[in-house]
């Protein structure tokens, strides 16, 4: 997901998206540990998406002060 797309979302939508991605990451880590994960790069992309969301949420909070 692109940062430009994420900036268009509201704070509530970003929080929900972050929760969804964290849940996906948990499931993928479990699959990876059990050897069932076919695409390990998906872990990396989800981690980056979570970081992007956290960055945008931080920017929004900083901008409101």
Image (tube, rainbow, N blue to C red):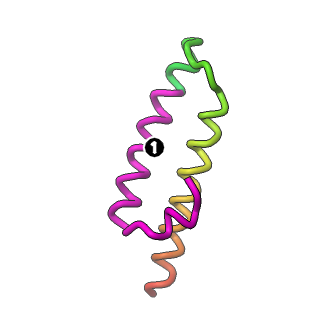
Give whichever of 44, 30 is nearer the camera.
44
* Residue 49, percent from left and from top: 56, 51
From the top left corner, tell me how far across and down residue 42 is, in percent. 60, 34
* Left or right of 39 on screen, residue 9: left
Q: Residue at x 46, y 76 (%)?
A: 61
Q: Magenta span has 45? A: no
| Residue at disc 1, secondary structure | helix
Q: Nearer the viewer, residue 9 or 25?
A: 9
The image shows a total of numbered marks equal to: 1
The stretch in magenta equals: 1-28
Residue 32 in picture, x, y percent from top left: 58, 20
Residue at which label 1 appears: 21
- Where, by quadrant of the figure, is residue 21 drawn? top left
Residue 33, position in %: x, y? Answer: 57, 17
Q: Residue at x 65, y 27 (%)?
A: 40
Locate the C terminus by quadrant.
Answer: bottom left
Up/down of 60 relative to 49, above or below: below
For disc 1, the neighbor class at 10 Å (few under 14, some 14 to 19, many from 20) is: some
Residue 44 vertical position relative to residue 38 in the rendered view, above or below: below
Considering the whole magenta stretch, tell me its main secondary structure: helix
Left or right for 17, reference 63: left
Compared across the picture, whether 9 is left or right of 35 comes to left
């Amino acid at each position: 997901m692109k940062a430009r797309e994420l900036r268009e979302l509201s704070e509530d939508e970003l929080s929900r998206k972050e929760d969804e991605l964290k849940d996906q990451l948990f499931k993928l880590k479990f699959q990876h540990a059990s050897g069932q994960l076919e695409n390990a790069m998906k872990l990396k992309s989800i981690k980056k998406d979570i970081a992007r969301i956290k960055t945008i949420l931080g920017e929004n909070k900083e901008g409101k002060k």
